[in-house]
Image (spheres, rainbow, N blue to C red):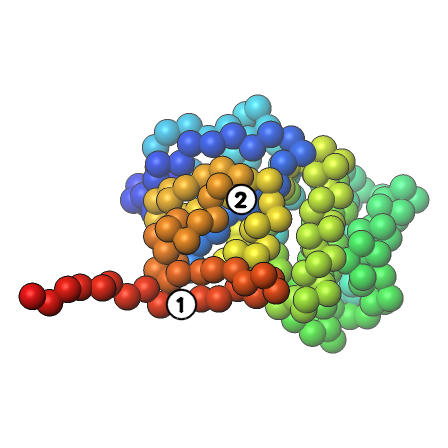
Amino acid sequence: MGYDGRAVVEGIDLRVPAGTWLSIVGTNGSGKSTLLRTIVGLLPPVAGRVEVLGGPPGAAPRRVAYLAQSRREGFLLPLRVRDVVRMGRYSARGLLGRIRPVDEEICAAAMAAVAVGDLAQRPLGTLSGGQRQRVYLAQVLARRADLIVLDEPTSGLDAASRARYRSVVREECARGAAVVAATHDVAEAAEADLVLLLARRVVAVGPPAAILTAENLLATFGVVISTLPEGILVVEPHHEHRTID
């Protein structure tokens, strides 16, 4: 995976079944966004083969929902929250297609799932960053996609919204969707079905209990991360211990 024929991350070999939540964990520059952009067809693979929903990336856009880490929002600001979430139904109805009552129901359910239903008539530009992020999550949910690809979806969200997000992901997996989400939050990744640790290479991949070890996290982040019984994550710099003769 990479740009202009130059690999940013390599050595990836995994399969994400339907109904599975895969959490991709790494620091900025580790290759998370590059991998996600390759999955959705925005970047061609530098080498190897990538198959998405039985075909090449980008071949089934109606079945894929993608939330990018950064978005150009200027042209959206005059729109209301309801209008932005409705865009999630364009893949089913077309840009000029008529929104049907069933679409309105899907959009209402998506807004309720991330607690933005009461903001439906508000202009997007009047919202806080966290509220806006929840609106974009609602838009993704409204697509009812078979594959949901999320790049740092909890960025800017408070604790309650993060908990709501995790519940929503579980509901989407129960519906049969596969969810692939990039994050740097180890606690969030621990709740996924599978974890892929990236550091411009694959550090480890598998179930969280087996993968989120101190050794693997050190290789991923360059720090030691441990968990206290109270549920608090402790991050400590790694120091080499040398014996002086």
Q: Residue at x 69, y 74 (%)?
A: 128
Q: Amino acid at mark 1?
A: Glu
Name the quadrant containing residue 235.
Answer: bottom left
Foreground pick, 168 / 234: 234
**How far across and down, in percent of the image, does residue 232 sit?**
57, 65
Position of the C terminus, as image quadrant, is bottom left
Identify residue for label 2.
208
Q: Amino acid at mark 2?
A: Pro
Residue that lies at the very extreme toward the right in this rendered image: 101
Q: Residue at x 49, y 37 (%)?
A: 206
Residue that lies at the very extreme toward the top in this rendered image: 54
Is 140 left, or right, of 155 in this rendering? right
Residue that lies at the very extreme toward the left in this rendered image: 245
Is 106 left, or right, of 3 in this rendering? right
Tags 2 and 1 touching, CB below 8 Å:
no
**How far across and down, in percent of the image, does residue 117 sit?**
85, 61
Q: Residue at x 35, y 36 (%)?
A: 11
Identify residue for label 1.
236
